[in-house]
Amino acid sequence: MKALTFKGGIHPHDNKHHTERIPIMELKAPGKLIFPVQQHIGAPCEPLVAVGDEVKVGQKIADSKAFVSAPIHSSVSGKVVAIEPVLHPNGSKVMAIVIENDGKDIVHESVIPKGDLSTLEPKQIIEIVREAGIVGMGGAGFPTHVKLSPPPDKKIDYIIVNGAECEPYLTSDHRVMLETPEEVIYGLKAIMKVFGLNKGYIGIEENKMDAIKVMREHAAKESGIEVVVLKTKYPQGAEKQLIKVITGREVPSGGLPADVGAIVNNIDTCTAIARAIKTGMPLIRRIVTVSGSAVKEPRNYAVRLGTAFKVLFEQSGGFVEDPAKIVMGGPMMGIAQFSIDVPVVKGTSGLLAFTKKDVAFKPESPCIRCGKCVDACPMNLLPIYLSAYAIKNNLEKAEEYNALDCIECGSCSYVCPSKRHLVQSIRGAKQAIIAQKRASK
């Protein structure tokens, strides 16, 4: 059984042993939940409720007329007690709907099964996905109905489910594959039907042999679903790398997966699609890995959207010592947090807390021209030059060296013996280039 992989990448300690063998725990919804109206890439939603309104589980509470957007639904029944700016996990302040949980979990009348997959038309499936507020659950938060609606000239040949979960510590997708494989398969079949395809792929890293076994057993009951074994390497789960190793096709510079006839979706995105069709329940919860050296009892939780981070840490026994750093997502590409009073959103795949020992700051020193960053870059870029141009604010040269193709995986910074903040400077250059392009339109 040959494991497929790509050129470049790194091999950080995966630290998945803390949670990979522990079943997912259903976390009780807290007394108050916060729903930011911006939980996805694209246009923010507008509230559909007012302070004082009673709401039910699965009820749509915010929406937008924009195509690139996704509605928000209440994950509990209760009362809207505030609509106000709150701190978002991305560090900004955004408008949010605050709901007081009545503890009754009364389900909204709109939450009903949407029909059998065999009788649903592609347009109906896309509409169900859109109305359920489903977005990419791997962290990016791109609205799934948009991904399922490529331009007519983009013929889709490959549907890939990303089960690589290459970020250290994170095991939520691993547990989902072990515990609800039938929902993963059902969601994949729904996406295959949208594009009229008889073949679908699930890519899983070889450090999850139990998940590979379970998914193959369930895939064998269907026709045209193949489980592909991937080499354990970071960032094996990056969209472009996944497409390259499974299809042999390379997404062009500045291009999108649809440009090479591929669509990639996350494991938990597939389960959300399955539930939306089978039960009518929109995206109101997700699986979150809580781990890290500062966490007493690491594990995975099924969490209602809107739950404060501190509730998850409290459920995990609190901290062994005051954490020096808290990250939403994985340690390589996650977002550092300065408060645990912020809510779980659709893109919260993990919450990691680290001790001072694990995040000890090491000062930068001059580049020694070793070339390790070049060898590690999965996009075949030249990180040291990109970083140098970024530091000098030479945006024209940075763009010439394909700064916009950087996926910000952090591999270059990880291997740098001089501890240079390569990805940080390149990210800054990317943002400046994009802003410059928008301003010139």
Image (tube, rainbow, N blue to C red):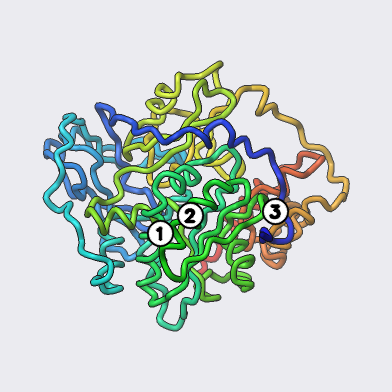
262 in relation to 311, above or below: below
Q: Which residue lies at the image location 54% right of the left edge and 16% below the top edge? A: 320
9 in relation to 332, above or below: below
Mark 1 and mark 3 residues within 8 Å of each other at the beta carbon: no
Viewer-nearest of discs 3 and 2:
2
- Taking depth in this image into account, of 39 and 245 the one nearest to the observer is 245
Question: Between disc 2 and disc 1, whose residue precedes?
Answer: 1
Mark 1 sits on what residue? 185
Question: Between disc 1 and disc 3, whose residue precedes?
Answer: 1
Mark 3 sits on what residue? 390
Q: Amino acid at mark 3?
A: Ala
Element type where label 2 sits in the image: helix
Residue 392 is left or right of residue 276, and the answer is right
Q: Which residue lies at the image location 32% right of the left edge and 66% below the top edge? A: 67
**Which x, y percent locates residue 363?**
76, 32
Distance from the alpha carbon under mark 1 to that under mark 3: 44 Å
- Taking depth in this image into account, of 400 and 267 the one nearest to the observer is 267
Residue 215: assigned label: 2
**Which x, y percent locates residue 140?**
47, 52
